Image (tube, rainbow, N blue to C red):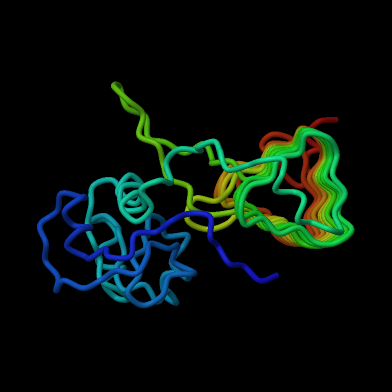
Amino acid sequence: MKINNNFFKKKNNVYLSNIFKVLKLNFIYKNIKINNIKDLKSAKNNDISFFNSLKYIDVLKHSKSSFIITDQKYEKIVKKYSNPVIVRNILKSVAIVTKLFYPDSIEDAVDLSVKISERNKFKKVKFGHNVLIGINVKIGKNTIIGHNTIIESNVIIGDNCVIGNNVLIKNTIIGNNVRILDASVIGKKGFGFFPDKNRNFRYPHIGIVIINDNVEIGCNNTIDRGSLSNTIIGKNTFIDNQVHIAHNVEIGKNCIITGQVGFAGSSKIGENVKIGGQAGISGHLRIGNNVEIAGGSGVIKNIPDNSKVMGYPAKDIRKFLKDNK
């Protein structure tokens, strides 16, 4: 799937000195233009990124980022691979720099460009009543859009898709043969902020949602867009009703996720994973391929390939059954 992210307007004239200024740091490097802020994996030369956990050390080793926001604890490690920018609070600093590049990314503003008349240009698409379409939307042939659905600006939807009634889609790229059932919300900002006694500091979300071919998403699902990276649903994955997928979550191919499952941010789910109803997946975890997670389980640590787990905290299903005879 070709990804061309036109969802968020970026400032083009950001220099390293500007970044140090908004972070209230003493400027110590030669002043150069910084192209963008990215996660470690996707950052390129003259980008700035961040490092806040040893679990990402392998990604750090291969990152092309010219500058990396971190704290004193990781300064010596980061120096081996890039130029560290030392701060007290890494994630809050990343939020401040992201807002510098993308000033309009904090709020999930209502897209007032959407209109009923815009849909007239789609010759091979069937629309229900009261469908609103934003500008720069692409919809493939033989796709059906249900009643009262809103497709905001820049969204891309592939061929042979069915979008149900009362669906809201923003900041999203959708492949072919995708089914999104009634009342789902796709592409809203994630639940990211820093608590403050006077006013909570919101975290910008400049990622998008990518839904690959042959996916089915049930009724009343909520899928948040990514913060710096993207939220991704792999090919041929089927998701039941009332599932919440938080920002930066990646779900692999051929997964089956049943009702009321919740995914916390930045967890990576492998291929051919099956998850029972009302299970919860904590943030920043790695779930391997061919894993089965029983209903009602609470997953709070990584799970290797080919495992079957159950309970809270989730553990090998044979051990769980033995311990609970």
**Residue appearing at x 87%, y 59% in the figure:** 124
Horizontal arrangement in the rendering, residue 298 relative to residue 128 (left or right) = left
Q: Does residue 282 appear in the picture of this structure?
A: no
Q: Residue 194: name its quadrant.
A: top left
In this rendering, the answer to whether 59 lies above or below 193 is: below
Q: Nearer the viewer, residue 176 or 131?
A: 131
Q: Is residue 311 visible?
A: yes
> Which residue is located at x 59 percent, y 41 percent?
188
Where residue 105 appears, x then y in whole percent? Answer: 43, 46
Figure quadrant of residue 34: bottom left
Q: Quadrant of the N terminus?
A: bottom right
Q: Position of residue 45 (x, y in %)?
A: 36, 77
Residue at figure coordinates x 30%, y 68% from the top left: 78
Total labels: the figure holds: 0
Q: Residue at image x 14%, y 70%?
A: 29
Q: Quadrant of residue 75?
A: bottom left
User: 165 or 87: nearer the eye?
Assistant: 165
Q: Position of residue 96 (x, y in %)?
A: 31, 47
Q: Nearer the viewer, residue 56 or 128?
A: 128
Quadrant housing the C terminus: top right
Say which of 319 and 83 sits in front. 83
